[in-house]
Structure formats: structure tokens, C-alpha cells
Amino acid sequence: MISPVFPDKVAEPHNVIPPIKSSYAALVNPNEGTSLSFIVAPTINGKKCPKLEPEDVTPEVVFRQSAVLCMVLQANPPLEVIDGFIRRIWGNYFRDKVCLVRPGLFLVRFDQNNEQQEVTSKGVFCFNRKPFIVKPWNAEMEINTEEIESLPGVTSLSKIGSLIGISIKTDRYTKEKSMLRYARMLIDFPLKEEFPEYIEFANDKDVLIRQSVLYEWQPIKCKHCHTYGHLEDQCSKKQAPRKV
């Protein structure tokens, strides 16, 4: 039998083409996510400000009633480890999903509301000799100085997204509420408008919310001729300064 011989150094390939980052539209499966709609916002004091009604957030209240928030004090275990730990301590209960809210904070969703009440009445748990904190989720609670807000539903997201453009669709994680730190939406934006850095809306308790907006992609716009497709230093309509 002849043993293969491997060279000490492997030649690096030339002219390596870096991978092209896929756009949001290419990443979103048409069968995933939730379809949104355009909802005209009322104008208050000259500014568009949608109002989230109680019926807009009712489905999210039901969602919240069957969920608990968990964290390990002074530790940041990965999601896979926490999922296995929860399966072991709550194996008799049906878990709908374990989600990562942010590093160190996890949301566990149950199929029945009474299961949420049962697991929170079991007392104190320990993970690797550290306290494993479990609390029912509500909109006013705070864990580790960070407030957990209620999640907007389909109608609420449609109202909020309509402040920017025409709301089309959410991604799968927003639909399944697997990513609770933000909501991700596909919006048809009119190019004649400026991209707002933040929007304002009133929640179901008539509290004005100022929400920052991050764009995954924006078209290039020239500040000189105000058209899209090139930057100001590449504008053919901009005259070069004359030499004296």
C-alpha cells in the first residue's frame, strides 16, 4: 500500500474572488415570513405618527403569557447548551421554542399558559453552580438593567413600516419571534424621499416611542445632482475648479 505524500506548503490560489453578499430580497424565501400591508398614518402636529391599538398587540399578549425569560447569573452560555439544560430540567413540559434574546438572556415559549406558571413555581434552579433565573415575561419587567418590550404584531409592524415606505414582508425570524432584539422588514421605499434615521409612533398605552432605523442596503446618491448611481466625486455634471 502506498501512503499519500502531502507537501509541506500548499500554494495559495490566485485571483480569489471574494463572496458576494446576498441582498435581503435574495435571502428571503417567498414562503417564509409574514406579509405586511401599507397603512396610512394619521398626521399629528404636522408629523405622521401611527397609533398602535390594543387589538393590534393582542396576539403578542397571548404569546407573552406562555413564555418565560431565563438567564444564568454572571455567565453567558451558548444557546445549544441552554437548550439541552432546559430539556433536562423541564423534560415533562412541551416547549415550543428556545430563543436567544441577547447574549446571556433566553426566552422559552411553552404550548400552554399553565406550563409557564408551573415552571416558575418550581423554585430556584442552578446551572453550573450558578443561579438560573426564571421569570414570566411581561412588558414592564427588567432583567440585568435592560428592559424587555412587547413585540409588535403584523398590524403593528405594518403601521410602523408604513412610516418609511410600503411594508411588504418580514423575515422568518421576525415571524417566528426567534430574534427579539429587532424586527426585520422588507419595505418598498420611494427614492425621492430621504432615508429616516428614526421614526416615532404611539404604542397601545399612548406612550410616544422613538425607534431608530437601520438599513441593510441603501442606493448610492450624488449630493451634487441628486441622482442615484454615483457619488459626488464621480459626478460628470460637477465642474472642476478652474486653475488661475
Image (tube, grey):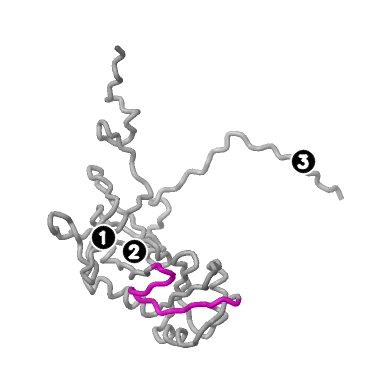
Amino acid carrying label 2: it is Thr
Q: Which mark is residue 34?
A: 2
Viewer-side label of 2, 1: 1
Q: Residue at x 46, y 73 (%)?
A: 97
Task: State the SS at label 1.
Answer: helix
Pick the front one: 81 or 132: 132
Give the x, y percent position of residue 236: 30, 25
Viewer-side label of 2, 3: 3
**Is 119 placed above or below 102 here?**
below
**Is 50 placed above or below 216 here?**
below
How far, Cα to Cα, is label 2 from label 1?
15 Å
**Is 40 placed above or below 9 here?**
below
Lateral position of residue 224 relative to residue 122, left or right? left
To which residue does mark 1 refer?
160
Q: Looking at the rendering, which quadrant does residue 53 occupy?
A: bottom left
Lateral position of residue 204 relative to residue 66, left or right? left
Q: Residue at x 55, y 82 (%)?
A: 89
Q: Residue furthest left?
A: 45
Q: Residue at x 23, y 72 (%)?
A: 205
Q: Looking at the rendering, which quadrant does residue 13 occupy?
A: top right
Q: Which mark is residue 7?
A: 3
Q: Earlier in the sequence, mark 2 or mark 1?
A: 2
Residue 132 magenta-highlighted? yes
Q: Earlier in the sequence, mark 2 or mark 3?
A: 3
Amino acid carrying label 3: it is Pro
Quadrant where the image shows the C terminus: top left
Q: Is residue 32 visible?
A: no
How far, Cα to Cα, is label 2 from label 3?
53 Å
Q: Looking at the rendering, which quadrant does residue 96 occupy?
A: bottom left
Q: Which residues are magenta?
A: 129-146
